[in-house]
Image (tube, rainbow, N blue to C red):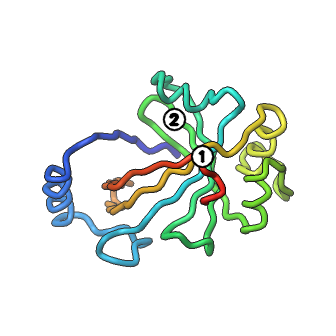
Amino acid sequence: MYRVEDKFRCSENDLRALQARVDAVLRPNSNQSGMNGYRVTSIYFDDLFDSYLQDTEDGIRLREKYRIRIYDGSFDTIKLEVKYKKYNRVSKISRTISKDQMKELIRGNCIEDVEKSLNSPVTLFNLAICQRGLRPKVIVEYDRKAYIYEAGNVRITFDRNIRACNRIDNF
């Protein structure tokens, strides 16, 4: 299922004003433990030529991303995700993996996949590792406050303090 995704850059003052309006009509995402939202930390993978990054920078309208994601600095839940973008519509396939599996992928090794299906993010990661030399390239971290409106499958997120690092061993 696709979701429409539009991103906007704005000042902190505008962000606060928008968030106050959204606070009045939507409820916070249930994954948030506190009033300030949660921290998202992702390690993005790319091929030897940084093709996925280049596609993003070039504004390619059909592209994909490979990442591992954790929340609030905890390895209790580790998500392996392949995200597809088609114009402003996005979809992703995701699976929870173990810390040992995460370490293997970060080392550039394939992991066991019980599904062995092209709908499995593990299968897709393994194929990209073998065929395209997929490797971890950058860590991106930010603070997120998320809201949902279930009736229309609407999700609004406010991301702040976006930062990046290419020292993969920091993950």
Looking at the image, can residue 133 be seen? yes
Q: Position of residue 93 (x, y in %)?
A: 62, 50
The answer for how far apart the CA atoms under marks 2 and 1 are is 15 Å
Say which residue label 2 marks: 85
Q: Secondary structure at mark 1?
A: strand
Q: Position of residue 24 (x, y in %)?
A: 16, 66
Residue 95 left/right relative to 18: right
Residue at image position (84%, 37%) is 130
Residue 61 left/right relative to 155: right
Three-letter amino acid code of the residue under disc 2: Lys
Q: Secondary structure at mark 2?
A: strand
Looking at the image, can residue 157 be seen? no
Say which residue label 1 marks: 44
Q: Quadrant of the C terminus?
A: bottom right
Q: Position of residue 64 (x, y in %)?
A: 59, 35
The answer to whether 117 is drawn above or below residue 96 in the figure is: above
Q: Quadrant of residue 97?
A: bottom right
Three-letter amino acid code of the residue under disc 1: Tyr
Q: Camera-side residue: 31 or 9?
A: 9
Do the CB atoms of the residues marked 2 and 1 lie less than 8 Å apart?
no
Q: Camera-side residue: 165 or 86?
A: 165
